[in-house]
Image (cartoon, rainbow, N blue to C red):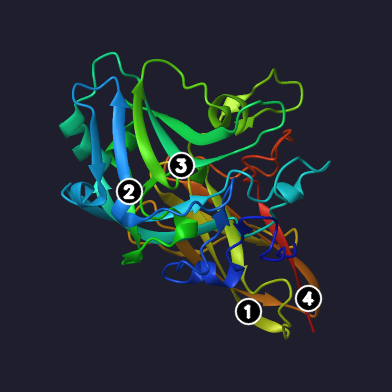
Amino acid sequence: MDHRSPEVGADCRATPIAALLDDRNDAGTHFIRSHHGVPQLAEDEYTLSVTGLVKRPIRWTLDDLRKLSQTTAHVTLECAGHRRTELDPPAAGVPWALGAVGHARWAGGQLADLFEVVRPLPEATHVVFHGCDLGAIEGYDAPQPFARAVPLRDPVIGETILAWEMNGRRLEPEHGYPVRAIVPGWYAVASVKWLTHIELIEGEFDGFYQAIDYRLREEGEAAPGRELTRMPVNSLITSPESTTPLAAGEILLQGIAWGGTGGIGGIDVQVDDGEWRSTRIDPGPGRHAPTRFSVPVTLEPGTHVVRSKARDRDGNRQPDKVAWNSRGYGVNDVCAITLTVS
């Protein structure tokens, strides 16, 4: 499968496949997905409000936020529409092929520490992250803001970062400056950029990007479909790429795996229709960082199809094929690339 051009649409950019093997993706290579352009926020005017079902609503500046307990984590983010161009018939949405995934070290304040200050009320069930970006949506009279909710009792709340740094540098505007949420292990849609408001609510959130969009609905399934939450286990062979000229003989296949639960348990590789072979794995710096894998294979002249299949520590495996869905979300089936050997 060929890697689509980095320019796949307005406000979108894919991570170069070769860069996925880097120790981390910098601001210039990490994939970007924005819905309503990049807001221009000034740091000295920025505030984050926390309201709703809390005992102590607050409105803090960035300097206030920096007084929270700070944390750093290496996290893989993946767009829910990654690889949607593989579905037949085509699904609606940004025509992502490979590359709508990236990984970096994010640093900022701990959301759980903030909750110690505002103290959510017992009836609160969900945390809503509101970005300041909004835009026109067909069928709606008013512009729709970008916001997503996470259950308050989900363990991921304890890992969520209110991030103002990426790889030791201040966030760039396209990555959410001044502050964004980082929700490890969940699809990147939950890691809301340009975060200006956190709201504690009771019951399900009914915002457009929660109740209507970013729902997985398979053929025959009732609308609006299922909510997208955690990333399933996934893997890609990233080297060599399908466009790389190769000479016959031993070739080192390399790639990354991510997602699932409990971390990556192993990755197998298949050449053509042969047996699946286990690979050497190199876990990253933390369970939300990508796991790199490699295995040498011997290839004769001709074309060869190579595949990778990952499993997590709970035994979940990449499926051989995913069911078609109307928006092309959650594609994590075994990905094949074709190599030409001379």
Residue to which mark 3 is pinned: 132
Q: Hey, what amino acid is under mark 1? A: Ile
- In the picture, the disc for residue 46 is 2
Q: CA distance from mark 4 to mark 2?
A: 53 Å
- Quickly name the residue at label 4: 340
Identify the mark nearer the N-term, 1 or 2. 2
Q: CA distance from mark 1 to mark 2?
A: 51 Å
Per the model, the C-alpha gap separating discs 1 and 4 is: 12 Å
Residue type highlighted by circle 4:
Thr
> Which one is earlier in the sequence, the residue at label 2 or at label 3?
2
Q: Which residue is mark 1?
A: 251
Q: Which residue is drawn at the image coordinates 42% and 67% (left, top)?
A: 24
In the figure, 16 relative to 308: above or below? below
Residue drawn at point x = 62 percent, y = 26 percent: 212
Q: Of circles 1 and 3, which is in front?
A: 3
CB under 8 Å between callouts 4 and 3? no
